[in-house]
């Protein structure tokens, strides 16, 4: 009797194991999804210099959409999997580091998205190479300063002890074009305090960005002077401190939107730059390709 009981238990245990094995096989049976791959080397900006200024850029990322669905943000150059095959619509948005911070990557709102029809094959890499973009046609260039003209659209203020000049023609300090802007401060208390000459109307319903190239061994403050309808100064609002670049040119995209909407009654703004020499060592600030953009 006892033997029969054990045989009964063994039989049902065997059946249970068979059922579990069958369920496991069914769970993992069938064709596995094999991804296609895509490779993007870089994204290049093309501009109409007379109206849009330099094509110098710092596009770091590709925001990749397939058939309208975002599949990821990829630091360039990048090779990445796509769980699609066949013909699809690829849309790539150029991405930058907002405010120069690697952790705040954004699809830059003023660059045109790139759209292509692509054919994807499982386990094969589609190399789209170097993509090109432009500024969106609705982009408004509120301010452009490339320091190539005789007149510079930056004015020093009463607080400044030094002026802003231009690098000599052919100087190795120049980033591109004929000149870059240059400031040198080598005594304690020497101060750069300058702002755009023009009063710019604050965009009513869209954001704004400041783009610029800089090369310096100083830590310079960038901010906005905000004015009321009568162009009376409301406040000077610092936005960001640009750190020393150790004699290398860098490009930055600074979001002005919050600063330009922070105070009631503001109607106009200027961009300002400020640095004070507190050590007596020699500081050099180089600037180029300043742009303020909106829609």
Image (cartoon, rainbow, N blue to C red):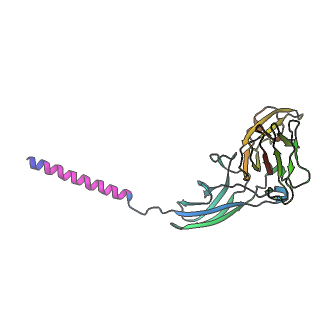
Q: What percent of the width, then of the height, locates residue 168?
A: 86, 56
Above or below residue 63? Residue 124 is below
Magenta span includes 138: no
The secondary structure making up most of the magenta span is helix
Residues 59 and 118: in front is: 59
- The image quarter in which residue 59 lies: bottom right
Q: Is residue 10 left or right of residue 209?
A: left
Compare residues 150 and 80 and report the one nearer the observer. 150
Residue drawn at 80 percent across, 58 percent down: 172
- Which of the pair 132/210 is nearer the observer? 210
Indicate whether 209 appears above or below 171. above
* Extreme residue toward the right, this view: 150
Q: Residue furthest left?
A: 1
Determine the image quadrant of residue 24.
bottom left
Point 78% across, 32% down: residue: 263
Q: Which residues are magenta?
A: 6-27
Q: Is residue 39 left or right of residue 192?
A: left
Residue 148: percent from left, percent from top: 87, 55
Measured as percent of width and height from the top left, residue 118 is found at: 61, 66
Q: Report the number of numbered marks.
A: 0
- The reply to whether residue 161 is in sight is yes
Q: Quadrant of residue 175?
A: bottom right
Residue drawn at point x = 75 percent, y = 34 percent: 262
Give the residue drawn at x 69%, y 57%. Answer: 113
Left or right, residue 243 beside residue 68: right
Tell me, yes or no, whether the highlighted magenta stretch contains residue 12: yes
Q: Residue 244: image x %, image y %?
A: 72, 46
Residue 198 visible (yes or no): no
């Amino acid at each position: 009797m006892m033997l029969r009981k054990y045989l009964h238990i063994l039989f049902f245990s065997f059946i249970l194991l068979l059922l579990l094995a069958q369920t496991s096989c069914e769970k993992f049976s069938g064709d596995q999804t094999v991804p296609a791959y895509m490779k993007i080397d870089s994204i290049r900006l093309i501009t109409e210099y007379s109206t849009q200024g330099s094509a110098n850029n710092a596009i770091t990322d590709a925001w990749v959409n397939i058939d309208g669905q975002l599949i990821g943000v990829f630091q360039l150059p990048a090779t990445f999997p796509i769980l699609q095959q066949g013909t699809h619509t690829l849309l790539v948005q150029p991405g930058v580091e907002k405010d120069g911070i690697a952790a705040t990557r954004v699809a830059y709102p003023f660059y045109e998205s790139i759209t292509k029809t692509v054919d994807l094959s499982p386990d094969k890499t589609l190399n789209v190479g170097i993509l090109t973009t432009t500024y969106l046609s609705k982009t408004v260039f509120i301010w452009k300063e490339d320091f190539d003209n005789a007149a510079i659209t930056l004015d020093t203020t009463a607080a400044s002890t030094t002026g802003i000049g231009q690098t000599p023609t052919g100087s190795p300090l120049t980033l591109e074009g004929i000149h870059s802007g240059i400031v040198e401060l080598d005594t304690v208390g020497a101060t750069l305090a300058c702002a755009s000459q023009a009063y710019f109307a604050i965009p009513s319903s869209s954001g704004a960005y400041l783009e610029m190239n800089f090369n310096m061994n100083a830590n310079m403050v960038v901010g906005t002077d905000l004015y009321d309808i009568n162009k009376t100064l409301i406040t000077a609002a610092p936005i960001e401190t640009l750190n020393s670049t150790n004699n290398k040119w860098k490009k930055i995209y600074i979001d002005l939107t919050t600063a330009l909407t922070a105070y009631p009654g503001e109607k106009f703004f200027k961009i300002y730059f400020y640095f004070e020499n507190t050590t007596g060592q020699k500081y050099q600030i180089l600037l180029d390709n300043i742009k303020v953009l909106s829609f």
